[in-house]
Image (cartoon, rainbow, N blue to C red):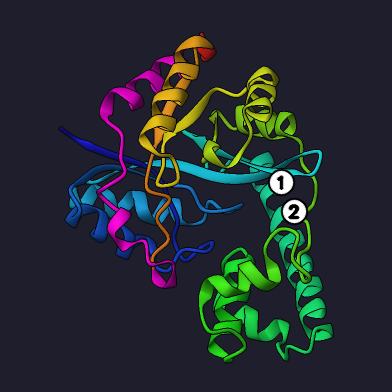
Amino acid sequence: MSKVDLHTHTSYSDGFYSPKELLLKAKNAGIDVISITDHDNVAAIKEAAAFGKEIGVEVIPGVEISTDVEDKEVHILAYFIEPENCELERYLQFFREERLKRAARIVNKLNSLGLTITLDDVLVKAKNSAVGRPHIAQAMLDKGLISSYYEAFNKYIGNGCPAYEKKVHLSPQSAFKIINDAGGLSFIAHPGFMQESLLKEIITAGVDGIEVIHPSNNPQQMKFYRGIVNEYFLLESGGSDFHGGKRDDEDNLGKFFTNVSVIEAMRQRLMKNSA
């Protein structure tokens, strides 16, 4: 059976590996189809798609966008987008700029807590990618301010912690429109992190599908979400949410995956939408 991983990240967002390195790891893990879903960034897709053809791994264009419902953050995965869509890139550029501003605010809060770190320390970790909290955590770890990567989130920069800062607000409905206008489909990422009432609210707002298979979803949850998919005539997706590096998730690549029938259902939905 072909392995399809529809949730991975590269060094263009908060992943550890370059697009080529990620594809080589995917190939070695027996993955035939992969989607790179970097946060607010589609820069890896062209390079990955070209290299994928060389080594026999199909690359589906994707992106992960953060949205908000009241005080809850909801991540939306997009598939089959047009990476060079001007409106999509305009929105993503705006989000990347807001990420930088947010990182600066978090650094200021950390400084006020007595933790000596600069925005430049964070940017060294981010390089040319979209700046996120993982880069701040890595910078804190390298400077010896914390004893583990996860301590940064649990103690300082995670939701509700002293140095936490919200991202710029974007509603799921707005994200759906951006994605739809770029020729793509929208999916709720890692639904296991949200309450059922919120899940139903986003379904009602017009999402195309749900990420049924994810490392954070246990077998009972996967069964439940597949039932929701069938009940509401939605699509399903699945993947490893692979980042690499200090995330300690190397074993997830090739372990959490879906199959080709999921891809075919997406393509059929897209054909129906364009008819």
Tag 1 near tag 2, CB within 8 Å: yes
Q: Is residue 255 magenta?
A: yes
Badge 2 crowding class, 10 Å Cα cut-off, few under 14, some 14 to 19, many 20 or more, is few
Q: Which range of residues does the magenta coloring cover?
A: 245-271
Residue denoted by label 1: 91
Q: CA distance from mark 1 to mark 2?
A: 5 Å
Badge 1 crowding class, 10 Å Cα cut-off, few under 14, some 14 to 19, many 20 or more, is few
- Residue 204's spot in the image, x, y percent? 68, 17
Question: Please, is residue 191 above or below residue 73 in the view?
Answer: above
- Toward which corner of the image does residue 102 lie, by quadrant? bottom right
Residue denoted by label 2: 94
Question: Please, is residue 252 above or below residue 266 in the view?
Answer: below
Q: Is residue 252 shown left or right of residue 211?
A: left
Q: Amino acid at mark 1?
A: Tyr
Q: Is residue 243 visible?
A: yes
**Residue drawn at the location 61% of the way across and 33% of the way down:** 179
Question: Please, is residue 266 above or below residue 100 in the view?
Answer: above
Q: Mark on residue 205?
A: none
- Name the secondary structure under disc 2: helix
Q: Residue furthest front?
A: 220
